[in-house]
Image (cartoon, helix red, strand yellow):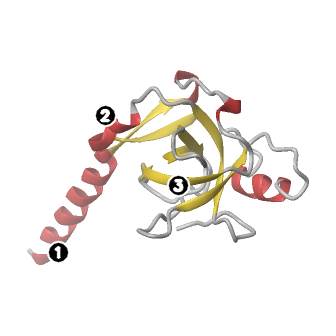
């Protein structure tokens, strides 16, 4: 009886997690690559999370960031889940199309040679995610780090 209860609990917990997230195609998103300059320092104010660590780079996570002058807000799509903590929300944006030589290894590692076609959406926060801010694709690193920060 106890084993059945544990199995039911695991099934219910797993399905609840999967229902929290949905996916849209990247084609449904209007990308504006020039909306945020490469190597801009930003403050992350929202992170979508996702159903897993996305190790196969099947989708992009959603972030909302305030730009360097604190007036420009941008959606950032990234293949790497970045941990954001209170007091540690500053990140450096590396554009997916960056041609800077020192950015290329980071981009190759993060994207694994793929162009993800889906974007994760956190259903309880869709009203935040569906906004009129411009959208860019890239990586978020700690301003002092040499590689993207992964959870």
- Quarter holding the N terminus is bottom left
Secondary element type, mark 3: strand
Nearer-the-camera pick, 105 or 65: 65
Q: Is residue 18 positioned above or below 1 on the image?
A: above
Mark 2 is surrounded, within 10 Å at the Cα level, by few (under 14), some (14 to 19) or many (20 or more) other residues, namely: few
Picture coordinates of residue 3, whole percent (x, y): 17, 75
Q: Is residue 14 left or right of residue 112?
A: left
Q: In this view, does 5 lie to the left or right of 36?
A: left
Q: Do the residues labelled 2 and 3 touch (CB within 8 Å)?
A: no
Camera-side mark, 1 or 2: 2
Secondary element type, mark 1: helix
Picture coordinates of residue 77, whole percent (x, y): 57, 42
For the residues labelled 1 and 2, the Cα–Cα distance comes to 40 Å
Mark 3 is surrounded, within 10 Å at the Cα level, by few (under 14), some (14 to 19) or many (20 or more) other residues, namely: some
Residue where numbered disc 2 is placed:
127
**Label located before the other in sequence (1 or 2):** 1
Q: Is residue 124 positioned above or below 134 on the image?
A: below
For the residues labelled 2 and 3, the Cα–Cα distance comes to 20 Å
Secondary element type, mark 2: helix
Q: Is residue 70 positioned above or below 141 on the image?
A: above
Camera-side mark, 3 or 1: 3
Residue where numbered disc 1 is placed:
3
In the image, which disc is placed on residue 43?
3
**Label located before the other in sequence (2 or 3):** 3
Q: Are marks 1 and 2 in contact (CB under 8 Å)?
A: no
Nearer-the-camera pick, 136 or 18: 136
Nearer-the-camera pick, 27 or 93: 93
Q: How many marks are shown on the rendered structure?
A: 3
**Which residue sits at x=51%, y=60%?**
53
């Amino acid at each position: 009886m106890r084993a059945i209860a544990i199995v039911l609990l695991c099934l219910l917990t797993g399905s609840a997690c999967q229902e929290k997230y949905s996916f849209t195609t990247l084609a449904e998103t209007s990308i504006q690559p020039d909306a945020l300059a490469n190597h801009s320092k930003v403050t992350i104010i929202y992170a979508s999370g996702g159903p897993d660590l996305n190790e196969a780079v099947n989708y992009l996570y959603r972030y909302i960031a305030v730009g360097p002058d604190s007036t420009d807000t941008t959606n950032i799509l990234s293949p790497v889940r970045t941990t954001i903590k209170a007091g540690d929300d500053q990140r450096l944006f590396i554009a997916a199309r960056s041609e800077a030589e020192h950015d290329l290894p980071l981009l190759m590692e993060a994207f694994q040679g793929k162009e993800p076609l889906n974007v994760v959406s956190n259903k309880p926060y869709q009203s935040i995610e569906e906004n009129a801010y411009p959208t860019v694709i890239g990586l978020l690193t700690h301003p002092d780090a040499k590689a993207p920060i992964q959870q």
